[in-house]
Image (spheres, helix red, strand yellow):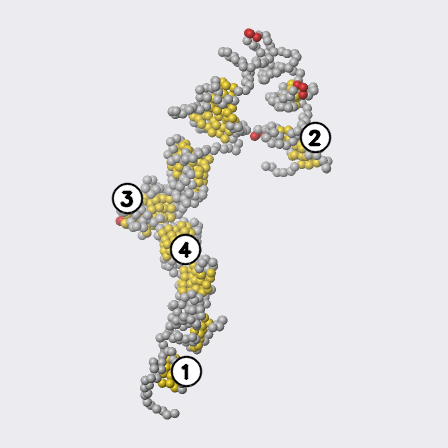
Amino acid sequence: MANIKKSFNFRSGVQVDDDHLIVDTNGAVGIGSTVPTELLDVNGNIKTSGNVTGTIGSFTKVIATDLDITNVNIQTGNVSGSGVKIGDPVGVITAQNVGETVTYYGDGQYLENIPTSQWIDKDVGLGFISIYAAGNVGIGTEDPRHTLQIGGNNNPNAFEEGVGINSRGGVVATGIITATTFKGDVTGDITSAESNITQVESTYVNTSGIVTTTDLHVTGITTTPKIEGLNIISQPQGPTETIIVTVDSKTTNNRYYNEGNSNAYYLDGKEAPFLTLVPGRTYRFDQSDPTNTAYPLRFYYDSLNDSVYGGGINVVGAQGTAGAYVDITITESSPQVIYYDSASAATLLGNVIKTNSAAQVHNLEVVGVLTATNNIVGSLTGDVTSTKSTFDQVDTSYINTTGIGTFGELSATQSFTGITTSSLTHVQDGLGIGINNPKRIVDIYSSGIATVDVVGRESAMIQIGQNYTVTAGIGESVGIIRFGTQDKTFELINGDSGDFNSYIHSGNFVGVNTGNFNWIYGQTNQKLMSLTYDGKLGINKPDPEVQLDVVGVSTFTGSVLITGNLEVDGDLIGGNTTLPPLITGSDIFRQTGISTFVDVDITNIVEVGAIAIGTSREDIIEAAAIDAQFSRAFVSALGIGTNVTPSTLTVDGAIGATGSVGIGTTIATSGADFARAGVPITRFLKLPRVTSNERDNLVALEGGSVIWNTDESRIEYYNESGGNWSYISGTGV
């Protein structure tokens, strides 16, 4: 083919072999297409060895061995390459085959929700997806040996220069720890140059390094050579420990900032520290520095310097001069809390000393349970908020508690207590219950119903009286409200020889109706007797109309003097009755017929052939002396088969009962009911007392017969099947 180097210009287009190549009049080029719809319209495959560059590419399908795309906008369909498919669904890139891996290169800052080989998504049902590491996580290290490790080496036994946290909450830190609050047990050595902790609450602390803390609470054992800052703890044995004292201005860290003097004591360079001193040591406060000149250091029971503590104190030299110091020796008898302050007019330069002794506490703040075996003397103020506060004896001028207090003996001039139990209580001024300012010695107030219960297992008694003496107790002359001394009995007693007065309407009330004295049966609320305010007594009549108004039969065992007229609305019935002269000699005596009386009160002897109670004469059992089969008979003493004057019931012979027998009760609940027999102190049953020989001579025995064998000191019963005696074994109560 000729090789022609020439430029050709076709104004109206060009076409080669009909459909192989065509350039239309618009400049559109069609390859394999006679009607190109785009500037380049190729009907068939395109192969290029160079780059294909374009602003927008629209492909039905792209198959690429190596695809490099700057910007992809897929609206429909997908783009697929060697093992990769893009856009089905839209915006998703997936591997063509299951199990294949898609690898990304370059900047992945906009990739989201893509876990790595170590991170796993987890849905625990909380409405969101969490992510966790399948292995250890390292920051600043490629070989973490802790669950979370920052820096450090890969040797847990010799860990250095890092922080490790395990899955059980353990933390290993080899650098400086700064914490606002630390709670929990501190074990091991704190070996950093300095550990700054604002607050530590621990049951056990064991440190050998330096710990700086604002507030340290240790409930267990603290093992340390020295804690600097607010506490000074020393060994219990050794020479005198010297503390250098200087005076300088207070800072905002001082507990008494803006209170008292503007200056403060500095002990070994620490501003007004809280001191812990132990028994068995002497502590020397060196006041040689000239800043001490106006501030002699002394010790007190309180922060206001009202009470000087002088036990084991030795003052040498004048403060502010060479060789001046104050010694304090701590012993087991030292107060648990002492304040150090200036003895001059200046106040609040110092702080508190805790001695760890078992002596008296002058200011005690208790959050938990407080138990005191010995006395508590002084003022007890504030709330007792523990579950239980137990004291053997409290002697105070003022007590204010809202919690639960248990006192063996409580003596207080003024008392405001919550729930309190006390074996013996002394309140000198007034005791208010439900009221802050009692107007009486005991003042009880309730916005609802006020109740006071006095209950004893055996009996209960309230005494009021006068003329108090140590030997006589509450008083030699007393009135008593008592219940239970006799079974189920309530008593009001005047123990002295004076009157027993009852008052109604004793106040200055105007226009109020005056009530009555009423005696009421509680089971029916029936008024059995009423005494009106104007002196009318009604018996079985709640509203008496005359001075004595009785409904029912009245019995007089003595003489009745009537100075006025005697009016009898019914019959006058009686025996050997002395009548007025009008009917003198008319004693009632009938030999025949029936005499009927409504009520008969006879003080002398009654001679009758037979007595029928609750039955008619015609129905009386033949030859019966007393027939009360249809009613009840009440007698104060009864003798049967004996002529000896009985005291209660005396029976000479056997007693037979076809029904039930009740002793101590009127309604027997069994064949023989002894459940309520006797008074409380004699409520027991005595068995027949026989010797072993007497037991063997007993006759007419039946199974279950019971005796007390005095030889063996035991209860024995007759065993009918074996024909012998058995006994009940047991141990003493």
CB under 8 Å between callouts 2 and 1? no
Q: Which amino acid does label 1 sit on?
A: Gly
**Residue occupying image coordinates x 57% and y 28%:** 679
State the image quarter where residue 498 is shown.
top left
- Element carrying mark 1: loop
Among numbered discs 4 and 3, the one appearing first in the sequence: 4
Among numbered discs 2 and 1, the one appearing first in the sequence: 1
Query: Would you place residue 527 above or below residue 283 in this image?
Result: above
Q: Mark 2 points at which residue?
A: 694
Q: Mark 3 points at which residue?
A: 346
Residue 631 or residue 626, whichever sits in front: 631
The CA span between labels 2 and 4 is 84 Å
- Element carrying mark 4: loop
Q: Name the residue under label 1.
A: 32
Residue 508: percent from left, percent from top: 38, 24
Question: Which numbered disc, 2 or 4, marks the residue closer to the eye?
Answer: 2
Among numbered discs 2 and 4, the one appearing first in the sequence: 4
**Residue occupying image coordinates x 33% and y 90%:** 5
Q: Which amino acid does label 2 sit on?
A: Glu
